[in-house]
Amino acid sequence: MTGMQFRSGSEHIYPQSGLLTPSWRNMTDSANRFKLIRSGALVDGTGGPVIERAAILIENDVIRAVGAEREVRPPDGADVSEFDYPGQTVLPGLVDCHVHLIGFGDGRSGDELALLPDEILTLQAARNARVHLDSGVTTVRDCGAKNRTTLMLRDAVNLGIATGPRMVLSGRPLAIIGGHLSYFGVQATGVDECRAAVRQLLKEGVDFIKITATGGSTRTSFPFLPSFNVEELKAICDEAHSLGKHTAAHCTSSQGIANAIDAGVDTIIHAIFNEPDGRRVFKPEIAERIAERGIYVNPTLMAAGFGAGGRVELLEEKRASDGLAPDEQASLDRMYRTRDEGIAEYVAMREAGVTMVSGSDSAWSHLKMGRFQAELEANVSSGMTPSEAIISGTSDAAKSSWIDDQVGSLQVGKKADILVVDGNPTTDIRALSNVVDVFQNGNLVERHNLP
């Protein structure tokens, strides 16, 4: 790794490790109103060309100029903190549009997770938030938590008690009685209760409404069947939209996806084309409707067995070291089949014109926080170019989360959330994991959980 060079005024400092010490970091966060970041290359997150020998000018927490180094200059006479990253790449802070901050990523079910006290879950959420931020994720959309756990964490971050990424929160998910995530969600039946539930959640301070439009891993749910009917879903979406909020719906059946489209859902999560008997049958007409409506799809590839960090990887590691029992091998074979079916659906949806956005679904099931880059690598393995995958995890993920006016791209007026990596992620997506530094709101993050 090439070390970053920092200077304030005309004085240069070359940290031995390439990272600033805590005392230097504090100085860069508070001493100057302006910051100037220079880098070997810049990727803006919109799909624009890579800018060589680039620079970003930050005023307080906002980007004021971005472009070629020779074109970006601070105001005359301004006191400026300068950061040099020769040979390295800057890009927008990553946006993970599907997390569950209260999860442990140790394989426990959501039914078990819901039994833990809120205090424990809030502390776990704080730990996960910090791990994700340190890994380069500066914005998360949390898609379901128990009671007010994540809302309290956000308050703590805003008060300076805790450190974490920018948070777009659903609070409690909206479910039918006994439906997926109903153990810590709002359970509603009928149009009136659905509208009332949306109003209650907004009163609690949520940013969007997470709907479980089909069953899922919850023991009392039916994963291949829709849950809410179309009228109920429409009531939820209409109420949310009328109050300026968006919706995201968990869908693991074809009928559930179709219902979500009819209701006006903004993002479809998982988008698995299951029949009521569990057979996976892709419906091209449904994919075409998703594309026509401009609905985003978050396919959660790692959760389906792609990339690093999931159950497939754990079983493959055990097979290589100790071997698998017959039932474990059968389970792994089923996961391979599911993964192949998922790749086929993913490719077909993209060919239909569906915009795929990246969300890791961590720390659900076996998915640990801090591995969002593996989700972007899985997109590349499934057919995206590295540049397309970066967009899916920055500007498009921000659009899906209705926060693209603030983050997701390196553009004038956006918040200065910036990731610095070693290498060129537009040619090798794995370079995104070579994290050098992370800036949030223009401030250099003191990363505790370094890889």
Image (tube, rainbow, N blue to C red):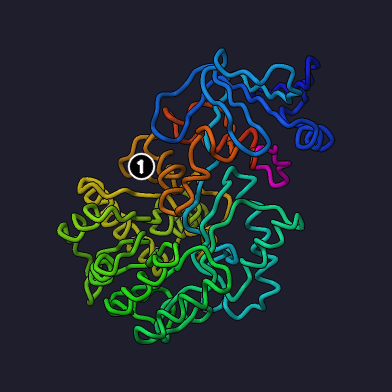
Q: Which residues are magenta?
A: 442-451
Q: How many marks?
A: 1
Main secondary structure along the magenta-highlighted residues: loop
Whether residue 323 is visible here, answered yes or no, is no
Does dot 1 land on a helix, a strand or a loop? helix
Find the residue positioned furthest to the right.
23
> Compared to 307, does 15 lie above or below?
above
Residue 221 occupies quadrant? bottom left
Q: Is residue 449 magenta?
A: yes
**Which amino acid type is shown beneath numbered disc 1?**
Ser
Q: Nearer the viewer, residue 116 or 365?
A: 116
Q: Nearer the viewer, residue 212 or 218?
A: 212
Whether residue 182 is visible here, answered yes or no, is yes
- What is the x, y in percent for residue 27? 81, 33
Q: Residue at x 78, y 18 (%)?
A: 9
> Compared to 151, does 378 lie above or below?
above
**Which residue has dot 1 on it?**
381
Find the residue positioned furthest to the top.
70
- What is the x, y in percent for residue 191? 34, 83
Q: Is residue 160 magenta?
A: no
- What is the x, y in percent for residue 304? 38, 58
* Left or right of 225, for residue 442: right
Q: Residue at x 47, y 31 (%)?
A: 44
Q: Nearer the viewer, residue 78 or 103?
A: 78
Q: Residue at x 29, y 75 (%)?
A: 224
Quadrant location of the C terminus? top right
- What is the x, y in percent for residue 450? 68, 42
> Compared to 278, does 45 lie above or below?
above
